[in-house]
Image (cartoon, helix red, strand yellow):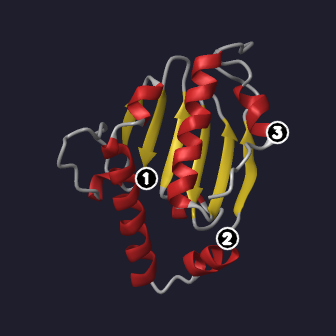
Amino acid sequence: MPRRHPPTELMRFLKPYDRETRQLALSLRSLVLEEMAPCHENIYDAYSAVAIGYGPTDRLKDGVFHIAVYARHVNLGFNHGAALDDPLGILKGTGNQIRHITIQTAAHLERPEIRSYIRRARKLAIADARKLGEKSLDAVQKDGKVISVVKAVYPKKRRPGAKS
């Protein structure tokens, strides 16, 4: 697996966070890309978090996972987590679609269930896309790239280093 360096913009967006949180976010990004690439990576410098979405296209509705970076932890979000089997009961959230796993230390990334949940979510997304006749997954997979795009930058921030 090729090493995928974070885009300059992502590093700039993560700069206000402490070193440990930045490293945790980048380590989770690497893990997700190991399991998801090739894919699109959509970066949002949002109001209360830096968010990074992953899917077969750059469309938000096609997203499979997302990473949300907060002051003291990161969340690994599953965009269709409500439909994902949760045999260990580790997914958090009560909405109609999204579930997440909170990751507070690098040791959490070593837990085998993290990759297991990522793999099952990806498999579910591929099955759903093919059921709908979408060819976008195949196009990205043949290309082999991670396409990173900054989708939105919100002027007001409520997080480390923010000036409101």
Q: Which mark is residue 145?
A: none
Residue at 80 percent of width and 38 percent of height: 9
**Label of residue 144 in the image:** 2
Disc 3/disc 2 C-alpha distance (Å) = 21 Å
CA gap, disc 3 and disc 1: 25 Å
Q: Residues within 10 Å of mark 3 (few under 14, many from 20)?
A: few
Could one spot residue 104 in this view of the protein? yes
Identity, as a three-letter code, of the amino acid under mark 2 = Gly
Image quarter where the C terminus lies is top right
Question: Disc 1 marks which amino acid?
Answer: Asn
**Left or right: where does residue 119 sit relative to residue 144?**
left
Could you tell me how far apart the alpha carbons at marks 1 and 2 are, in whole angstroms?
23 Å
**Foreground mark, 3 or 2?**
2
For residue 159, say whether it is visible: no
- Element on which disc 3 rests: helix
- Neighbor class of circle 1 (other Cα within 10 Å; few <14, some 14-19, many 20+) is many
Location of residue 54 with respect to 99 vertically, above or below: below
Q: Specify which label sits upstream in the sequence, 3 or 2.
A: 3
User: Could you say which disc has been placed on residue 79 in the image?
Assistant: 1
| 117 relative position to 16: left or right | left
Residue 38 x, y percent position in the rendering: 62, 65
Q: Residue at x 39, y 74 (%)?
A: 128
- Please tell me which of labels 1 and 2 falls first in the chain: 1
* Picture quadrant where residue 60 is located: bottom right
Looking at the rendered structure, the kind of residue marked 3 is: Thr
> Residue at label 3?
8
Q: Local crowd at mark 2 within 10 Å, few (<14), some, or many (≥20)?
A: few
Quadrant of the image containing the N terminus: bottom right
